[in-house]
Amino acid sequence: MTLTDGPALTEERVRPDLDGVPETLLWTLWNRACEARRPDSVLRDPMAVRLVEALDYPFEERLGRPSPLFAQTQGLRSLCFDRSIANYVARRPAATVVALGEGLETSFWRVDNGRLSWLSVDLPDGAALRERLLPAHERHRVLARSATDLSWLDEIEDPGRGVIVTAQGLMMYLRPPEVREIIAACAQRLPGGVLVLDSMPRWVTRLSRQGRVRIGQLDIPAMHWSMAPDERPKLHSAHPGVAEVRALTMPPGRGPVGRLIQHQHRIPVYRSISPAVTLVRFR
């Protein structure tokens, strides 16, 4: 892997001052970077590797040694979101991508077609870290705002060109009414758009509320929203403008574990206990 690929990052090492939900962005970055370092990686992401090197943070001490399962799962999840974006902008090349709770994801540099616009929405601490570490770009903006503050919809410059909203690793930390409000607002304001989100199974959110989900020395904050596979149709009730709700299949992975990750939503014994990615399309 050539770590000089892509735009330059900051030359100084940055110490992130994060806790609670914002700190979880470092765990997803760590797993993505660990996967990207592999010669047989499922996700090409040299910028994630450089971000880890640019941060003054004890990743292994704080988050534990990289797990091949978590790393590949994170890589495939990011790739699933990338492909959803690419499929949408293939039809609407000048569309706007709104990435809610984006953290230090680097999808823009993986899927940019030279025409799309990108709006990254994150809490102030995460937004400030993103602006400090990642290179500026004329078609990439960072908005320091909670995803539940729906005024981010007003920042979309030309909705008529198409809009795809992503919520990767976000919705589970919101309350159920907040999730429905976001879906309803998108359906109301973004006709012809789509929302791609991921969800956690009920057993994970329940344990998190009991303070029993820990990764290394990181206590995962309480999760409030979950969705069982057979509950997907309920998302239609968020707004009449919801035209379609469907599961997305993970891209093919590496080895037997990769195949299991790809098809977990089709296997009853696994789909009720595994994370899932869902696409919501608006009329």
Image (spheres, rainbow, N blue to C red):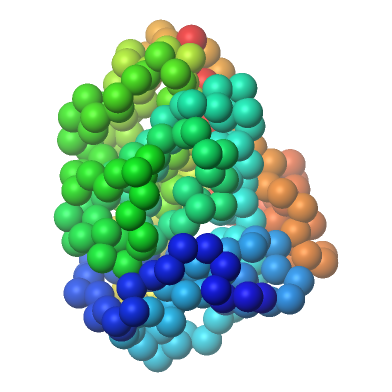
In terms of depth relative to the viewer, which is nearer, 57 or 246?
A: 57
Q: Is residue 207 left or right of residue 82?
A: left
Can you say which quadrant of the picture contains the N terminus?
bottom right
Q: Which quadrant of the structure image shows residue 25?
A: bottom left
> What's the residue at 37%, 19% (across, down)?
159
In terms of depth relative to the viewer, which is nearer, 162 or 194?
A: 162
Percent coordinates x, y for residue 275 in the rendering = 55, 51
> What's the residue at 61%, 70% (across, down)?
36
Q: Is residue 134 visible?
A: yes
> What's the residue at 24%, 29% (across, down)?
155
> What's the residue at 49%, 26% (across, down)?
94
Q: Is residue 128 above or below residue 242?
A: below
Residue at the bottom extreme? Answer: 61
Percent coordinates x, y for residue 87 in the rendering = 63, 32
Percent coordinates x, y for residue 205 in the rendering = 40, 54
Percent coordinates x, y for residue 91 in the rendering = 61, 22
Q: Is residue 280 left or right of residue 57?
A: right
